[in-house]
Amino acid sequence: MSVNDTLKAAAKFFELTEFPNGKALLLKAATTSNKKPKPDTQAARLGARVKKVFIDREWVRQYNAVCGFKEDEISLTAPQVVASPLHMYLLSRPEHPMPMLGMVHLHNSIECAKPLEYGVAYDVLVTVGDTRSISLGLEFDVHTQFLVGEEVHWSSVMTILCRVKGMPKPLTKPAPVEPLSALGAQYAAVKVPENQGRKYAKVSNDYNPIHLYAQTAKMFGFKQAIVHGMWTAAKTLSIVEAGLGARASKFDLSFKQPVFLPSGISVKHVTADSASKFEVLAERDSKVLMVGSIAA
């Protein structure tokens, strides 16, 4: 789909001169709690764009220090974080019929067609896509693109769940997912300290209270604080990518369970033909926390 077709598909589109303030948007998100979607509610087909965005080298260095990448490399996950204020801007708008607080990040599919570079002016385009009914509620897609003219250099599809009561139950249970074979698997143990959420918040500007302290997380129903899902994704990428022998260009992941703070995780991965399948496991009980694949 061309950029013009993408813009036409949006019921409402916003041209912004700069990224909105993430902290202010988090406060705005709290005001969306009175929204009560029904089983037939559809996410608003909104879109927004910021033109002439340059990736900041110093910010990348700080992000990489927290996530485990080489000092100056623009990783596959970094653009998702750069664009996150646009995600929050659209999902906190009055036209969007679902509350932001309590939304669950389910999946991400990221693809880099051309490595992003410093000194290049990118147009960052975010649009809200299809809504689907599942047993837990409503899931919808958020599309993000980094473009130069009409050419897409980097893109992602983020799938978000909004829990809704009264959804119809599925007629059949989904087939159980086969665990990743231990044959030929490599394991990397990672300690996730109590302050990891606060460290990542400084570079991502995502100060959601569930990630900061046990006391603030308990206000939202969590027994402990949980780390940002995109930190877990980035840390996993930094580990698995090292075994690929090349920079990753595709990253598909699904979140299964949160990573509590503090805790330990193990990244289990099997690599063949420049592609890896992985599982992130809880150190304590080997519960599967995240699964996916990474390819060069």
Image (spheres, rainbow, N blue to C red):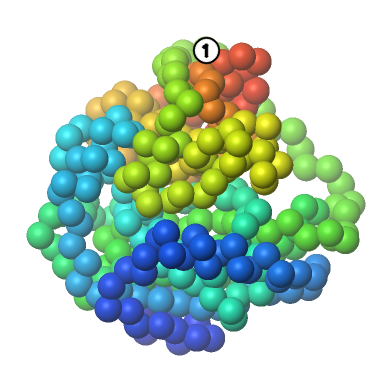
Which residue shows up at 59% across the image and 63% down it? 30
Q: Looking at the image, can residue 150 be seen?
A: no
Q: How many numbered discs, if any?
A: 1
Split into 4 quadrants, where in the image is the C terminus? top left
Q: Looking at the image, can residue 120 be seen?
A: yes
Q: Position of residue 6 (x, y in %)?
A: 43, 79
Against 95, is 156 above or below?
above
Q: Residue furthest front?
A: 215
Residue at the spot of label 1: 183
Which residue shows up at 62% across the image and 57% down it? 101
Disc 1: CA contacts within 10 A as few (<14), some (14-19) or many (>=20):
few
Secondary structure of residue under mark 1 = loop
214, 15: nearer the viewer: 214
Say what amino acid the circle numbered 1 marks: Leu
Which residue shows up at 88% across the image and 54% down it? 169
247, 93: nearer the viewer: 93
Determine which quarter of the picture holds residue 250.
top left
Split into 4 quadrants, where in the image is the N terminus? bottom left
Which residue shows up at 37% across the image and 65% down it? 21
Against 293, is 278 above or below?
above
103, 286: nearer the viewer: 103
The reply, left or right, for residue 98 in relation to residue 191 is right
The reply, left or right, for residue 171 in relation to residue 15 is right
233, 246: nearer the viewer: 233
Q: Position of residue 266 (x, y in %)?
A: 49, 19
Determine which quarter of the picture holds residue 271.
top left
Q: Position of residue 131 (x, y in %)?
A: 65, 68
Q: Residue furthest left?
A: 119
